[in-house]
Each structure stands twice: as structure tokens, then as C-alpha cells.
Image: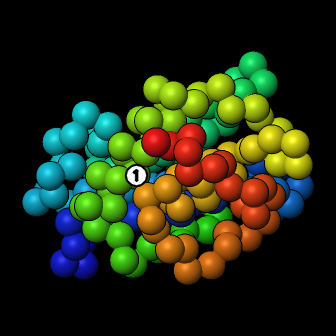
Amino acid sequence: MYGKKVLVFIGSHGVSNVKNLINHTSIIIFASNDSKFYNHQKFDYRESTFGRKVKYATIGAGPINGKLVCAYNRAKDIDLNIKIEMIYLEQANENTVDLLLVAADNYIKNSNATDYDATALRGYNSNSFTHGLLKAAGVKVPRTPAFALGWSNPVPARKFL
């Protein structure tokens, strides 16, 4: 995997009936066979867009009963075939992945009751979650994902502590 034990991306796919009008983002983490995450319970072999299996996991969030709920390997998040954008987080390493997993687990334990708002004007949406998670883990994002409504309103870092 390009000499790295993990590759981390922001992946996005459309969520509206009009292609590319609004996109949902999540974190996609690929693990090489020499990574400590290779046998981690959240990582599994899945079919890639190139027809071969790769080991990866995703972290994302979505609405359940009016709340923004974090989950690993959500059905559309793990589907690489529907991704319309993949932003490579070049500086990410195994330590970054540790921080992302801890922050996501903390959110699940402590804050899975964050109010959901599709527009992220009065609450937060999946893009707010992805951006907040990356900030909480200290990850610098090279650019804003396209059509990621809510990206500019990240979930506060305290929700990931």
C-alpha cells in the first residue's frame, strides 16, 4: 500500500435524487497486512472497485430518530463503488487511526444523542460529524469535500472526548 501501513480517506457519495447536489462524507481506512489494524474487529475484507478484496473499515454518522448516530461500516459508507470523491489524508498514520477510533468510540459512548439537522443550521449532519471527528483527532484536511453541506459546522470536539 504505497509503503504505508494504513491509508485514510474522506469518501463521499450522493444522498439526493439529483446527482452531486448534496454529498455524505465518511472516513475510510485501509489496512495493509503489516498494520496493527489488519486483524482489528472493525476491519474486514470487502470487494473493492477493482474487483479484488481489500481490508478496510469506515466511520460515519447518520440520522436515527432525530439524532446524529455514529456507526462503523454503514452500508453505503463501505460501498466503494458509489464514491464520487476520495480525498487522501496523506499525513495520516496508525497513530491517526488510533485517535480516530478512540474519538468515534467516545462519541458513541457519550454523545450519540447529538441533534440531527439535515441542513446543519440548527444541529449537525453527517458532514458535520466527519469534519468534527477529523478535527478532534488533529487531522488537517487538505480541502473541503464537494457539496458537503454541513462541513462548515463541525460537531464540537467535546463530543468526542
| Residue at the image point whose x is 46% and y is 42% from the top | 161
Quadrant of the rendered image containing residue 97 = bottom left
Residue nearer the viewer, 25 or 117: 117
75 lies above or below 119: above
Q: Residue 59 appears at what percent x and percent y?
A: 48, 45
| Residue at the image point whose x is 33% and y is 61% from the top | 96
Point out the residue furthest to the top here.
65
| Disc 1 crowd, CA 10 A, few/some/many (<14, 14-19, 20+) | many
According to the image, label 1 marks what residue? 100
Q: Is residue 44 left or right of residue 112?
A: left
The N terminus: image quadrant? bottom left
147 lies above or below 124: below
Q: Residue 71 appears at what percent x and percent y?
A: 51, 33
Q: Residue 152 appears at what percent x and percent y?
A: 76, 63
Q: Could you tell me the amino acid type at mark 1?
A: Leu
| Residue at the image point whose x is 80% and y is 41% from the top | 123
Residue nearer the viewer, 155 or 119: 155
Q: How many marks?
A: 1
Residue 46 in sight: no
